[in-house]
Amino acid sequence: MSALIITGTDGSPGANAAVAWAADDAARTGLPLRVVTAVHRRPNEIPGFAALGGEDVMTRAARKVLDEAEATVRARRPTVEVSTALLEGPPPVVLRDQAPVAAEIVIGSRGLGGFAGAVIGSVSMHVAGHAHCPVVVVRAGQTPAYGEITVGVDDSDACEPALAYAFEQARLRGCTLRAIYAWQLPVHAFAPEIAYDMDEIRIAQYAVVADRLAAWRQKYPEVSLIENARCAHPVEALAEASAGSDLLVVGSHGRGALGSLLLGSVSRGVLHHARCAVAVVRSS
């Protein structure tokens, strides 16, 4: 089966924004789009008392959400091949289980079941932490296009999948790509008795960025690339850059057994603080 772009919807503003984002990306990539919604019944909510049409209330409501999402995609991107799927189960599990056939999964930052005031909902956090494909988390009320994508860079091979995704998105969109390497001084740098050459440190950090990006520059010569290395916490630097970006791409170094820990501290922090859509691209 060819890869699909998967987007989940529950009819919330965040989900509607995700459907629109996914439709646009399907048009750019030429991939088919599948819109998924989940019907989650508690143990005592058996599908009984069907309506005259043969479906219970929850199923009919879910189909209405899917029909509206499909209509949105067809109106926005008529050339996109779109299908829908109504699946039973907890929404995070249903979406996570789509990963084997997904080129990416696109979800809203919060759905209808989220806590008031929460920035990131439990569904998006779970899917971003578990799915072994790029997961794009989209906020409602996205700002106008800036023509720039930001990607986080570090000195490990774990960021390579994120760089691959970011460069390809920049190519497809004709965007400038800003690569940010945020570094922090080691603790002993603040000890006055230890000599520390800040200029030497800065030169070394810029070399990290240049070395990491050299092969990607050759592979994507058409992408306009800006290299930034700055002394700051990675979450702070990336969240600040997100204010002028259409998309922020981060890798994930999480290794824990719990869903939130699978993300790693930087990707979790970015999901909470970024002001644009965020793509989390896990290394494995």
Image (cartoon, helix red, strand yellow):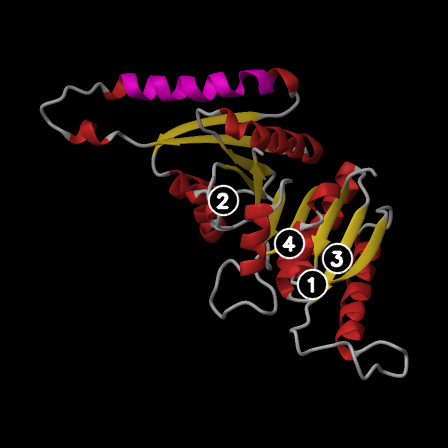
Say which element carries label 1: loop
Looking at the rendered structure, the kind of residue marked 2 is: Leu
Neighbours of disc 1 within 10 Å: few (<14), some (14-19), many (20+):
some
In the drawing, what numbered circle is on residue 36?
3
Lower position in the chain sequence, tag 3 or tag 4: 3
Cα gap from disc 2 to disc 4, whole angstroms: 16 Å
Is residue 143 in view? Answer: no
Whether 78 is drawn above or below 87: the answer is above
For label 1, the residue is 89
Query: Is 60 situated above or below 253?
Result: below
- Determine whether label 3 and label 4 are within 8 Å by CB: no
- Look at discs 3 and 1 and give the one toward the viewer: 1
Mark 2 → mark 3, Cα distance in angstroms: 23 Å
> Could you give the CA–CA distance between mark 3 and mark 4, rounded to whole angstroms?
10 Å
Which residue does the image show at 66% across and 22% down from the upper left? 222
- Nearest the viewer among 55 and 74 is 55
Residue 191, percent from left and from top: 13, 29
Point out the tag, 4 or 1, that comes first from the N-terminus.
1
Element type at marker 2?
helix
Disc 4: which residue: 107
Residue 263's disc number: 2
**In the picture provided, is 54 more to the left or to the right than 266?**
right
Kind of residue at badge 1: Gly
**Mark 1 to mark 2 CA distance (whole Å):** 23 Å
Mark nearest the camera among 3 and 4 is 3
Q: Is residue 1 magenta?
A: no
Q: Residue at x 58, y 69 (%)?
A: 113
Give coordinates of residue 158: x percent, y percent: 51, 29
The quadrant holding residue 47 is: bottom right
Please tell me whether mark 3 sits on a helix, a strand or a loop. Answer: strand
Please state which amino acid type lies under the numbered disc 4.
Ile
